[in-house]
Structure formats: C-alpha cells, structure tokens
Image (cartoon, grey):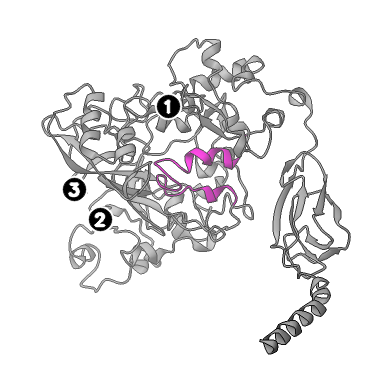
Amino acid sequence: MKKLAVQLGTLFLAALLAAPALAGKPVKDTTPPVTTATPPGGTFDSAITVSLTVDEPATIYYTTDGSTPSTQSTVYSEAINIAQTSTLKFFARDIAGNSETVKTEIYTISTTPPPTGPHADLSFTSLGMCVSCHTQQANDMYQSVHYQWQGDTPQMLNQGGAMQGKISNSVNSYCINILGNWNGCGACHVGTGAQPVATTNPSTAQLQSIDCLLCHQKEYKRVRNAATGLFEPDTANMTITMDQAVRTVHRPQRANCLQCHAKAGGGDAVKRGDLAIATAATTDVNYDRHMATTGANLNCQSCHTFTSHRVAGRGSDLRSTDSAAVLECTNCHASKATSTGHVTADVNRHVMRVACQSCHIPLYAKNAADTAATEATETHRSWLGTHATTPPLHPAGTKANDLIPKYRHWNKYNTNYLLGDVAVLDPATGAYPTSRPAGDINDPASKLYPFKHKTAEQPITLGSRQLIALDTSYFFATADPVESTKRGLANMGMSSETPYEMVLTDTFQMLNHQVPSASAVLQCANCHENTSQMSLKGELGYALKGPSSVVCSQCHNAKNPSGYTKMHNHTNDRRQFDCSWCHTFSRPELGRLMPN
C-alpha cells in the first residue's frame, strides 16, 4: 500500500510540473482566410474600384486577366481599378500558411459612353412604356409577321394569298401546331403574353402588349407570371437593372434574334439545323464565315433587312412573306451571278442552275470549335414517348451532327400542309409531307438548293386523313400520347374518340447559314464523280436518255465514254451543245455548254 502511494505521488508531481508547459503551447491554425470582393462581379456603366478584404492577417494574391493569381498585397485589403472588362481571380494566404480556394469575379465595363439623348434619364415603368414615344414603330411592329405570327402568302401554292401562319393553320413535323399550348409556344412571341389579335387599328393597350426589349436589349430577361399569364422582367437573372435596360436600348444583335430562332422546336439547334446559340459569339470561321466574330461578324439584319419592322427573307418551310425586299446572296456578292464571276468557266456555267448555298454549305449541324455544347440538330422525333425524366417531357428525338444536305429543285414556291388539309402520302419518301419546295429539273425558274430533311411520327385521323394537332401542353406534362391526341382532336373541334393512327411525316427546310471558309466549298468531283454528296441521277433527274453507247453514237462512231469532265467540255469542238442531246431533260435557257 505504501509503495502504491509513492507511485501515485510521483505521477501527480510530474503532472503538476508539466502543466504550465502544456498550458502555454499554442493550438495550430488550420482555418484558411476568407477574402471578399466588393462590389461583386457584374455589368457596370463605367470604370469601378473593387475592394478585396480579408478577415484575418494575410497576403492577398490577385490578377485581373483571368490568369493564375500572382500579384501580392501584404495588407488586409486592396483597392483594384477595373477600367475594362476583366476576370478578377484572387485568394489569400494567412501567416500560418493556410490558403483559400481561388475565387473568380467577372466585371463587364461598358465600352460605350454613358447614355445620352431621349433615353438617358428614363426610369422603367412597364414593358409597354415605349409606345408613348414610338407609336408609329409600335403600329408597324403590330402588323408584322413577327408579332401576328401569320401573314400574306404569295409564294404558297396551297391557298396562296390567304393568311397563314403558326398562330392559326400551319402544321410542321416538330410541335405540329400551336393549338392548346399558347403559353409554351408563346414564350418566343414578341409580346408580353397576350395572344395577338389581327386588326388594322390596334388600341393603345394592344400596342403596349409589344415587348420591345426582347429585340432591343440583349441583357433583358423575362419570366411568365403563373397567375396572370403575362411576362415580367426576370431581374434575378439579369446583369443590369431595368432602368439601365431602358436607357441603353440598341438595334437587335445576334443574341437577341437567336434566343428564339436558335431554340425553335424545343432546344438549341433543334429545328433549323443551320442556327444555334453558338452563332451569337463564335470565333470559328469554319462554323459560320459570315457571323463569326473573326470573320465578317455580320448581324442578322445585315442580310435580313427591315423596312417598317417588316423583315426580308423566308425559309422554304415558312408560309408568310413579311417583306417584299428580296434576300439573295448576290445582294452582297453581285458579281457571282454573272458568267465571269467565278475563277473557272466550269463554275460559271452553274450559276444559272445551282444556288450559291448548294456549293457553299457542304455540311450542316456542325459543332462550333469554341463551344462545349453540341450544335447537333433533330433529324427525327416520335410522339409515342419521351427521353426526358423531368418536365417538360419533350417527345423522343434523334439528333445528329455534320449532316449532308438533301438537294432539290426550287422555284421559290412551296406546298406546305395546313391544319384540316387531307394529307397525301409522298411515295418518293414514304412520308406525309408537311413542307415541300416546288420546282423540277425542267422548270426554268428552278435552281438546285440544299435542304435539311426531317421526319416525325405523329397522329393522323383514319377517315379524313387529317394530321392531328396533338395537345403539346398536355404531352409535355405527362408524356401520354393517347390522351394528348384525344385533347388535340377536341381542340380541332372533332370528337376525342375519332379513330387515328401514327404515321411518318417529313419536311424539307432550306439551308442558308453555316457557310464555312471558301476553302471548304464543294469541288466538281464531290457531286459529279460520286454519289456521297448528292445523287444527280437517282434523285435529281440528271440521267442519260439511253445507254452511253447509244447517246455517244448520235455524233460519233463507236467510242468508249470518257470521264465526266472531258465529256462535258468537248474542248476542241466548236459546236453548240444542248443538254437534251444527251439527257432526258431539256433546259433551252442554258443554250450552249461551250463558248464559241
């Protein structure tokens, strides 16, 4: 017992002697500092000073060009002058060696002077405020196809001249028709949410329903109010205030146009095939030579000119013609339509027969080199199911990149399916057409154009053979094709129990964008010496009227036909040749194939 007491006393004494030393040992600092930038990143009208502050003694490291932070400040705060658009990266390291994760703030400084003129002192009151000063412009816009979503149709062969458009009777192989889903489809309408009403004398309230900022302020965002059904500014997702928005309105930029036109059909690049969000700012000239920022850097209205808010240009699958102004490549490239506009005589002989786009758009649905997203386009969709897991439950679709166009003769007229028409099967494609370019090989007004060809599986009535405007609003919520079709029948004024079946439809859509650099233009052999690009004989009618031995014997004794180039040049022959001598078609306007 005495031995145990001695041992306990020894341990107590040792602990007592050690206690002061343990109490004085510092605890190791393992907490990194926290640096804050004031103000945070955003868009500013002029140069600003950004303050970096840290919550404990530390060294601040920063750069303003987005590179690895290296500039040091040994104080607890740093004032940085931001005079132009900058990517500020920063972090701090405390005296214990703890470093925080690198932080990033992006500051966009306006390169234009502060607003001047009539907009400089404006304060935002409502989306209809523009009408008070711009009444005539509002009236012009109200009557346009952009606002009415329908218009005159002088180039339609079925019911041509009558009002046609997506707001009423047009049907396509994408979302079919607008019936039953104004709220969804109207998200891209240039109004504040109300469905447009055709009238030659709109009221002030109707004019105030135009959302001017959608086209005239690229920083503007909006959201539909679920209670009222009307759009209101989505300031939480904007980088400027609404006062700044109305003070800095501008002519439409690519980003304005593409927020709707690139996302048509349900997502980026889905519908057009030659337009995507990437078109707004890409530097890739091989993606689009005309609109790349390192290329011609054209705005949309450089080609699609506006007159009193009416826009020039009309795709082959669009019904309405908004402006009488002609949109042609030769508006800028006038010499290219002449017999001496190109380097070689072979190419010059094609300009009366072949549209510029056919040679200069060898592929569409390309991926831009400087975007992470894909610019693939939809080639088929089925309303029998969905690939989505959360709403909106879009129909199952197939998308692809780097597609070769389909080529067709086109004379600028079309037959496009209208709601209520009797659908007629096209035996050439095995599908019911929703859009077809008019023209053929013997039509002197036709040229060869490139098209996107798209198919879809959608419902049709068994008896009257009318394509059914399936209720897309209900489908997007449920992915139920049966009930969506029944509701679509009811929307069309038919019994929801009308028998129907699913059929294949298809559409041809003219391609105009994604012109690459000139080095990528098609060469003669691409089309004339193989069929990978186009089938001149099988699809387009460029066939000999008999066996080559018979055709050649019209002018020669028995000979073996030479290659394409020699056969068409006859360079030592001074006679004039007409296509019909060898081919099944006749194009008298071509005259001779060789000069005298």
Q: Report if residue 505 lies within the magenta region.
A: no
Give the image location of residue 150, x and y in percent: 40, 25
Q: Dots 3 and 2: beta carbons under 8 Å? A: no
> Disc 2 designates what residue?
583
Q: Residues within 10 Å of mark 1 (few under 14, many from 20)?
A: some
Whether residue 191 is visible here, answered yes or no, is: yes
Q: Report if residue 253 lies within the magenta region.
A: yes
Residue sticking out furthest to the bottom: 3
Q: Is residue 421 left or right of residue 412?
A: left
Question: Magenta segment range?
Answer: 252-281
Mark 3 against mark 1, which lies toward the viewer? 1
Mark 2 against mark 1, which lies toward the viewer? 1
Q: Earlier in the sequence, mark 3 or mark 2?
A: 3
Q: Earlier in the sequence, mark 3 or mark 1?
A: 1
Q: Dots 3 and 1: beta carbons under 8 Å? A: no
Where is residue 65, by image quadrant? Answer: bottom right
Mark on residue 430?
A: 3
Q: Residues within 10 Å of mark 2 (few under 14, many from 20)?
A: some
Q: Nearer the viewer, residue 111 or 152?
A: 111
Q: Is residue 265 left or right of residue 328?
A: left
Q: Residue at x 43, y 45 (%)?
A: 267
Q: Residue at x 56, y 30 (%)?
A: 306
User: CA gap, disc 3 to disc 1?
Assistant: 30 Å
Circle 3: residue type: Gly
Q: Residues within 10 Å of mark 3 (few under 14, many from 20)?
A: few
Q: Secondary structure at mark 2?
A: loop
Q: Secondary structure at mark 1?
A: loop
> Disc 1 designates what residue?
149
